Image (cartoon, rainbow, N blue to C red):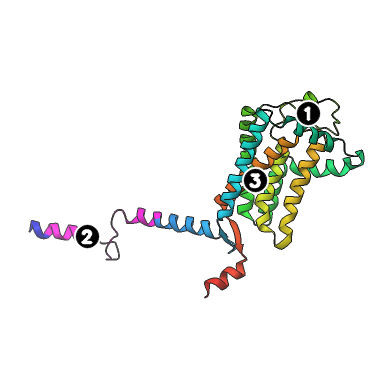
């Protein structure tokens, strides 16, 4: 009787209330892992609105080029290799006509740190959640990387090191000048939002970024190498985050058409 009873108990333990075979002990955990893996795979390729996303080798090159620019600018500044050329170019731009002040002051506002969370909120409002997340992370990276760069390359503002500087508006006269935080912000924004534009509209974010860099030199806040380094760090941030979050590759309708083939 004991072997028969043991068989009945074993059978009862391997069936559920409906009489169906019960799943193995680890099946539930494996199922949850598969669901998580499926969700991650869908997130990696597709947004909730059906838009397809991809990672581009071009962004690897962009990030590497940006980091390389920062290193080169840092070496040049730290060793004063082209100090005369840097100062001469600064003086030329800084002494442009005073009538340029209103547009220059206005355009440089797009490079303030608050532009990143503001654009992130706007992107979330338009359901571009990946872009919103990338812009939010970019704000954190900007603060961290700027601090690191200032630790390695400590350069004073133009007004502290060069005579005859024209300070316009509320341009900083004291503190560390390398790299330009405004340039970091606007070039990170350009790298992140440009993939969302079509055709020649992609040029607009980069044109705005270049204008911000010129404005910071014109206002007397930075030397040219400072804004070049800031641009490099901004491009580095944008390239890395484009690799992490992906960039749009097709409209939802195009994606559905491709799936139906």
Residue at 72% x, 51% y: name it: 206
Q: How many marks?
A: 3
Q: Secondary structure at mark 2?
A: helix
The residue identified by callout 3 is: 235
Q: Are marks 2 and 3 in contact (CB under 8 Å)?
A: no
Q: Which is nearer the N-term, disc 2 or disc 1?
A: 2
Residue 114, how many percent across, how many down?
A: 72, 41
Mark 1 Cα-neighbour bin, 10 Å: few <14, some 14–19, many ≥20 = many
Q: Which is more foreground, mark 2 or mark 1? A: 1
Chain part drawn in magenta: 5-33
The residue identified by callout 2 is: 12
Furthest-left residue in this view? 1
Q: Which is nearer the N-term, disc 3 or disc 1?
A: 1
Q: Is residue 138 above or below residue 54?
A: above
Residue 239, how many percent across, how many down?
A: 60, 48
- What whole-number distance in Å separates the C-alpha atoms at marks 3 and 1? 24 Å
Q: Is residue 78 above or below residue 55?
A: above
Name the image quarter holding residue 104: top right
The residue identified by callout 1 is: 158
């Amino acid at each position: 009787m004991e072997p028969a009873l043991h068989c009945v108990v074993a059978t009862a333990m391997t069936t559920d209330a409906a009489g169906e075979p019960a799943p193995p002990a680890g099946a539930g955990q494996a199922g949850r892992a598969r669901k998580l893996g499926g969700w991650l795979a869908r997130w990696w390729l597709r947004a909730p609105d059906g838009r397809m996303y991809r990672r581009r080798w071009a962004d690897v090159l962009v990030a590497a080029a940006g980091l390389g620019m920062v290193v080169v600018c840092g070496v040049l500044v730290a060793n004063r290799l082209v100090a005369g050329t840097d100062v001469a170019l600064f003086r030329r731009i800084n002494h442009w006509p005073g009538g340029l002040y209103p547009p220059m002051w206005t355009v440089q506002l797009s490079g303030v740190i608050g532009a990143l969370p503001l654009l992130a909120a706007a992107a979330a409002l338009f359901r571009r959640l990946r872009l919103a997340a990338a812009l939010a992370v970019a704000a954190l990276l900007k603060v961290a990387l700027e601090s690191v760069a200032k630790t390695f390359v400590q350069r004073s503002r133009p007004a502290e090191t060069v005579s005859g500087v024209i300070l316009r508006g509320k341009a900083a006269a004291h503190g560390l000048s390398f790299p330009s935080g405004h340039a970091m912000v606007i070039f990170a924004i350009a790298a992140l939002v440009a993939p969302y534009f079509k055709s020649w509209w992609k040029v607009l974010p980069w044109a705005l970024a270049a204008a911000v860099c010129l404005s910071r030199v014109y206002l007397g806040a930075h030397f040219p190498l400072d804004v070049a380094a800031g641009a490099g760090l901004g491009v580095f941030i944008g390239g890395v985050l484009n690799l992490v979050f992906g960039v749009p590759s097709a409209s939802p309708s195009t994606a559905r058409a491709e799936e139906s083939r």
